């Protein structure tokens, strides 16, 4: 038992999130280097995905296929077992990222020092805030010209709506970048712009020590002392409890490309980041140290090869020990299932695992039994919460283009929705099916996959919609009245819940003003 608890406590399961190009891939790679999981830079993956940009989605899908290998990257670092969950770089697959965030215990956000907080970062932070996920921020690319670090801190605070506390501080920037002072460990790290070598650091407990000048010169030494004084005056001491509650984000500065400031980040991360936390199910709270195994599917990766309609379901283990070849209950179907070849990725190698612990992710080969959000247990009827659908941003009517293949089309749509490719709604006004996505690409992906995997042809017809929101009201009468009055805007989601589909922000605002008793939700879980 002691061993089991230790296994849980030493796990750190997290995701790195950023706006494309801020340096997520580079940072991931450096972390893997520290863990000895890879030995050369450039080994993680080509990040052509986002570079081929919006048009060539086949290429993107191919890359996504490859990226199964990097879906979960496990490695050992000191006494810790670290699991990094990868998130797609392309913003049209943001929904994948949202769901991945439901399976992590903490997050590292990468921000480009020249660009500050960008759109994608802001959106992802909203999801973290909703779930109270602890975040650490890494301000990247200090080797380039960028903004004043105090400015960046202000922007992080106001744009990400979270209190911040710098734990390291840059000494100059761009061409004059000399290194960072590690506030947390009180040492000075001098910058050597080499891409592979882990930098040495000098212990520097007393910043007033005149030796500082000999390392970084007089003017930078004075500036550093003044900056640190200001920091200590403005920002309260770092409070780990506040970080764990998701209220406070420690901030580090560095250059991922040059492997600078990354070790400081990693060392602090393993120390302060949470081990697997209790997870809420509809029925009760499930604690990781419980003896019986439970887990949920947060991601399904389909094989694009039409000859093998197989996929991998990624399961996050919430409690107990997962054991290969044991019988587990698939709660939604009530069926018992056995998995003879669950896989995990350790140090970049995919292998069959015999057992896995809370915080770990196992990949289960599947032929269409699983759906996002499904729960596996040792018999208990449990339904994990926290896998909300997010309000889609683009909508189209989907129509059948081949009347002989209606059955295939419906089956295909159902399975693709189960996989979480997009969301489907039925308009209560005209009974037509509406598909909602977060990116244009999904429409193309759906059309292609319906044809190639299900032999069904669909066509898209435009519909002008602004937002879909789930509605709720304690007063049945008011709700009924609303639905009658707004009949033309009403739809049902796949679970039969009421969704209000506003065609403009004006219509949404009017509805909110006219019906103050009704709650409008932008995620399906509330
Ligand atoms: P992403 O996954 O967040 O999208 O970003 P990625 O790591 O791919 O980094 C985006 C670009 O920024 C890459 O350059 C990468 O080399 C560069 N970069 C990352 N960290 C740093 C840093 O600390 N300093 C500097 N100067 N650049 C950094 P690229 O030219 O787009 O790609 P590549 O050809 O260099 O791989």
Image (spheres, rainbow, N blue to C red):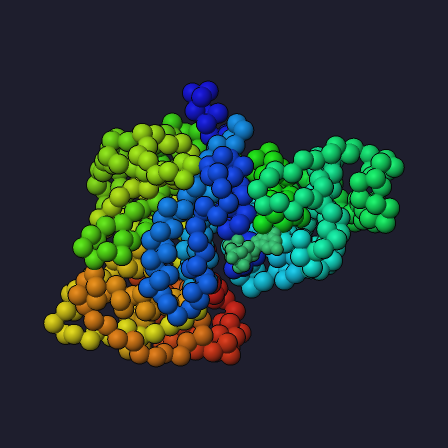
**Residue 408 coordinates in the image, percent (x, y):** 17, 64
**Residue 392 coordinates in the image, percent (x, y):** 42, 66
* Residue 483, quarter of picture: bottom left
Q: Residue at x 52, y 69 (%)?
A: 516
The answer, for residue 78, to whether it is visible in the render is yes
* Residue 125, quarter of picture: bottom right
Q: Residue at x 25, y 63 (%)?
A: 449
> Farthest residue toward the top?
2
| Left or right of 17 on screen, residue 489 | left
Q: Residue at x 24, y 31 (%)?
A: 325
**Residue 118 coordinates in the image, percent (x, y):** 58, 62
Q: Nearer the viewer, residue 165 or 302?
A: 302
Q: Residue at x 23, y 38 (%)?
A: 337
Q: Nearer the viewer, residue 250 or 217?
A: 217
| Left or right of 421 on screen, residue 141 | right
Please identify the quadrant where the N terminus is shown.
top left
Residue 305 position (above or below residue 519): above
| Left or right of 2 on screen, residue 210 | right
Q: Nearer the viewer, residue 490 or 174?
A: 174
The answer, for residue 485, to whether it is visible in the render is no
> Farthest residue toward the front?
194
**Residue 432 coordinates in the image, percent (x, y):** 27, 74
**Number of numbered tags placed on the structure image:** 0
Q: Nearer the viewer, residue 228 or 460?
A: 228
């Amino acid at each position: 038992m002691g061993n089991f608890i230790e296994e849980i406590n030493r796990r750190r399961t997290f995701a790195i999130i950023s706006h494309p190009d801020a340096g997520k891939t580079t940072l991931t790679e450096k972390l893997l280097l520290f863990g000895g999981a890879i030995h050369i830079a450039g080994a993680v993956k080509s990040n052509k995905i986002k570079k081929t940009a919006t048009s060539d989605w086949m290429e993107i899908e191919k890359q996504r296929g490859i990226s199964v290998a990097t879906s979960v990257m496990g490695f050992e670092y000191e006494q810790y077992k670290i699991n990094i969950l990868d998130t797609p770089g392309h913003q049209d697959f943001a929904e994948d990222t949202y769901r991945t965030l439901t399976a992590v215990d903490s997050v590292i956000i990468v921000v480009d020092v020249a660009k500050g907080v960008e759109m994608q970062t802001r959106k992802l932070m909203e999801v973290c805030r909703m779930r109270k996920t602890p975040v650490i921020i890494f301000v990247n690319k200090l080797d380039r010209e960028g903004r004043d670090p105090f400015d960046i801190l202000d922007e992080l605070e106001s744009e990400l709506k979270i209190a911040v506390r710098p734990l390291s501080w840059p000494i100059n920037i761009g061409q004059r970048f000399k290194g960072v002072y590690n506030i947390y460990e009180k040492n000075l790290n001098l910058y050597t712009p080499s891409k592979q070598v882990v930098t040495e650091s000098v212990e520097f407990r007393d910043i007033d020590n005149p030796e500082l000048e000999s390392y970084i010169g007089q003017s930078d030494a004075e500036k550093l002392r003044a900056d640190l004084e200001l920091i200590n005056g403005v920002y309260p001491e770092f409070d780990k409890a506040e970080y764990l509650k998701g209220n406070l984000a420690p901030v580090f500065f560095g250059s991922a490309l040059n492997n600078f400031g990354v070790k400081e980040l990693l060392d602090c991360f393993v120390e302060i980041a949470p081990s697997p936390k209790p997870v809420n199910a509809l029925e009760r709270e499930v604690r990781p140290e419980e003896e019986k195994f439970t887990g949920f599917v947060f991601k399904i990766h389909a094989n694009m090869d039409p000859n093998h309609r197989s996929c991998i379901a990624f399961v996050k283990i919430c409690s107990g020990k997962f054991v290969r070849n044991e019988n587990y209950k698939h709660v939604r179907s009530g069926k018992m299932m056995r998995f003879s070849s669950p896989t995990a990725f350790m140090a970049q190698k995919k292998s069959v695992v015999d057992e896995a612990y809370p915080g770990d992710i196992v990949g289960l080969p599947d032929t269409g039994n699983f759906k996002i959000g499904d729960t596996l247990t040792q018999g208990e009827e449990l339904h994990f919460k926290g896998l909300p659908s997010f309000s889609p941003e683009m909508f189209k009517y989907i129509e059948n283009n081949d009347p002989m293949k209606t059955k295939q089309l419906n089956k295909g749509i159902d399975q693709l929705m189960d996989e979480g490719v997009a969301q489907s709604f039925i308009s209560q006004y005209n009974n037509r099916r509406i598909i909602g996505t977060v990116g244009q690409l999904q429409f193309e992906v759906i059309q292609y996959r319906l044809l190639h995997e299900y032999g069904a042809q669909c066509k898209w017809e435009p519909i002008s919609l602004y937002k879909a929101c789930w509605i709720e009201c304690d007063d049945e009468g008011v709700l009924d009245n609303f639905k009658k009055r707004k009949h033309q805007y009403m739809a049902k989601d796949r679970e039969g819940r009421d969704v209000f589909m506003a065609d403009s922000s004006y219509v949404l605002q009017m509805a909110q003003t006219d019906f103050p008793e009704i709650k409008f939700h932008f995620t399906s879980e509330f």
